[in-house]
Image (cartoon, coloured by chain):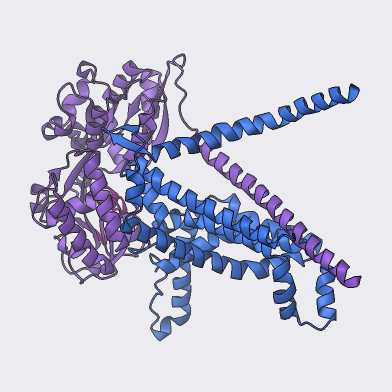
Chain colours: A purple, B blue
Amino acid sequence: MMELEGAGGWGAGGWTGLSQSRLSRRNLLAGLGMGALGFSLSACGEPKGSASAAEKLNFYTWDTYIGETTLADFEKANGVKVQTSYFATNDELFAKLKAGNPGYDVIVPSNEFVTRMRLADMLQPLDMAQIPNFRNIAPEFQEADYDTPLPRHSVPYTWLVLGIGYRKSRVNGTPDSWKWLFDSELYKGRIALTSEAADLIRLGAKYLGKSLNGVDAATTKAVTDLLIRQKPNIKAFHEDNGQDLLAAGDVDLVLETNGDIAQVAQEDADIGFVVPKEGSLLNADTLAIPKGAPRAAQAHKFINFLLDAEAGKHIIETILYPTPNAAAKALMPASYQANPIIFPTGPGMENSEWGTFEGPEQARIFEEAVTRMRAA
Amino acid sequence: MNGTTDLRGGAAALMGLLGPPLGWFLMFFVVPMAVVWAYSFGTNEGVADIRISGTFANYARALEPLYLGILAKSLAFAALATLICLVMGFPVALGISFAPPRLKTWLLIGVMLPFWTNLLIRTFALIALLRDEGFINKGLGFAFGWAGFEPLPMMNNNFAVMVGLVYVHLPFTVLPLYAALDRLDRSLLEASLDLGAGHLRTIFNVVIPLAAPGIASALLLTFIPVLGSYLAPDLLGGADSQMIANVIERQFKRANDWPFGAALAFMLMYLTFIGIALQSLARRGREPE
């Protein structure tokens, strides 16, 4: 009898334990649901596309990419309140607008995404008569292969070049070749590369003496093999936070953009930047108006304001990026105009190229090559 | 008659009660999952469109050795992280279940407290801890600098990823374990101790068998989110730390190959379903006839 009861207790104990664990799983899932809700709420900082709020403008841009007082200045001058929301990658911008414009008036796509968004019919042609300040843009940036044929669908806002950010005291001389990142054991364990597949393969092609546009299968394979060989020497593939790794001393050489390195070099004189002599990839971020923008007229006014010399000066004072705005640059102090990181010179710059948008298939090939390299 | 009316009223009330959550579940869980599932049979057209063509090409690609290899490695990673979580979480859960009631509440809050901070911020906190110039290495350097201390390589490698995965998912193990252990019939434990079994023997021969279903739930509940983690390998990992969720994430973002990403994601879903099915089969096996 005692034993029977014991057995019953065993079973009951087992079952209560089971049902309790089921209950707690549900509770936990509910908790996770709350977490997801929190996420979606924070993602809900989207503008409302109501046309009645005509005094507002929805600006969709990168974080910390505007002057401290720029938006307030625009509101003061035009009575239009600019509401800002942020994206972290071009892909996020593209994905958000792919399903239809939720109410953004001005966006900041990079050059290759201007091509891609034009192909996908996601941008409005600009009425350049309403953007007279376009004359402030330096002549070499007024022509844009990525935004053809006319009419223009974008105006340049900043430009960038990829290169090697390095800690001067830990590197021999100037590491002015991609070799030090892609093909050398000298800085073993002190190198961080980007995790952007297209950038990696294209710059590898540059190192092999090819153009970074129209990279063929054989070159992709050669670069992948090169990177597989180099992988034991690489510490990390960073998520666009290479400047932080360099500043924190985690690595001594990093593949990054000049703008990002300039920001940390301002606080640390031991940080340098070079565009390797084989040449590199040039990028621009642009201002554009997406299809379905509720307030296109105000959007033109805002773009024109951002291209103004004074407004442009305020912007670059804050963000320290290279500007294509010649009038704004002329107002800046020599410490900016002659900054060798912000405006690099030399053979590297002469050999650099703009990347052209080569379609989704090429992007997939690059992505798979890098996945293969990372898995090797 | 009266009884029938009551019953109908009850049914209406039940529908009223169940309707909104069911509708929510259908609208925001089933439908999106169905859309992604449909994508996994789709083809990219142009720069922005996906046609649901019914192709199996995405699955064929997902079954290539490259991706199967990454999947196998991720499974091994997730299994190791889950095991560490179990070994670390079991004593914690046991301790909480035997704590005095007032303390118990505080300990449970302690386990859940990290959820109040965003995952990204917790991961960055780990970076601050583990990096070469981080708190641990700085502290050790301060203590042992005289002996020529070199910073321990704790960041940007698989060790860091494992620390991140275990740290983030430990509560997922502790809570269901606690739920199971707290419901144990204490008289059985006392009986075991009375009849001469030591503490360890009681744990292994009495507590663990009794809590087996809870342990299984804890394992599953930890393993699945670990397998889907991409933040830890991205931010803490080194050149070799790619996991399957990183590959999936990139398909939806940079590679812009949603159909392939959907196929890879649903490979994980199928695996998860199989895991849950196996678990319930095992349960049925234990069920007394």
The spot of residue B14 in percent (x, y) is: 75, 30
Q: Quadrant of the C terminus of chain A?
A: bottom left
Can residue A323 be seen by looking at this rendering? Answer: yes
Using residue A219 as the reference point, say whether residue B28 is left or right of it.
right
Using residue A284 as the reference point, say whether residue B241 is left or right of it.
right
The spot of residue A136 in percent (x, y) is: 18, 28
Q: Quadrant of residue B87?
A: bottom right
Q: In the current view of this chain or complex, which residue is farthest to the front?
A: B289
Using residue B220 as the reference point, say whether residue A271 is left or right of it.
left
Given residues A160 and B54, the one toward you in this image is: B54
Can residue A67 be seen by looking at this rendering? Answer: no
The spot of residue B125 in percent (x, y) is: 49, 59
The residue sitting at 73% across, 54% down in the picture is: A19
Asked whether B185 falls inside the magenta stretch, the response is: no
Q: Quadrant of residue A276?
A: bottom left
Looking at the image, residue B71 lies above or below residue A334: below
Q: Quadrant of the N terminus of chain A?
A: bottom right
Looking at the image, residue B6 lies above or below residue A232: above
The spot of residue A107 in percent (x, y) is: 33, 30
Asked whether A269 falls inside the magenta stretch, the response is: yes
Q: In the current view of this chain or complex, which residue is farthest to the top?
A: A52
Which residues, given as a range, are shown in magenta? A260-272
Given residues B259 and A201, the one toward you in this image is: B259
The residue sitting at 90% across, 22% down in the picture is: B2
Number of callouts in the render? 0
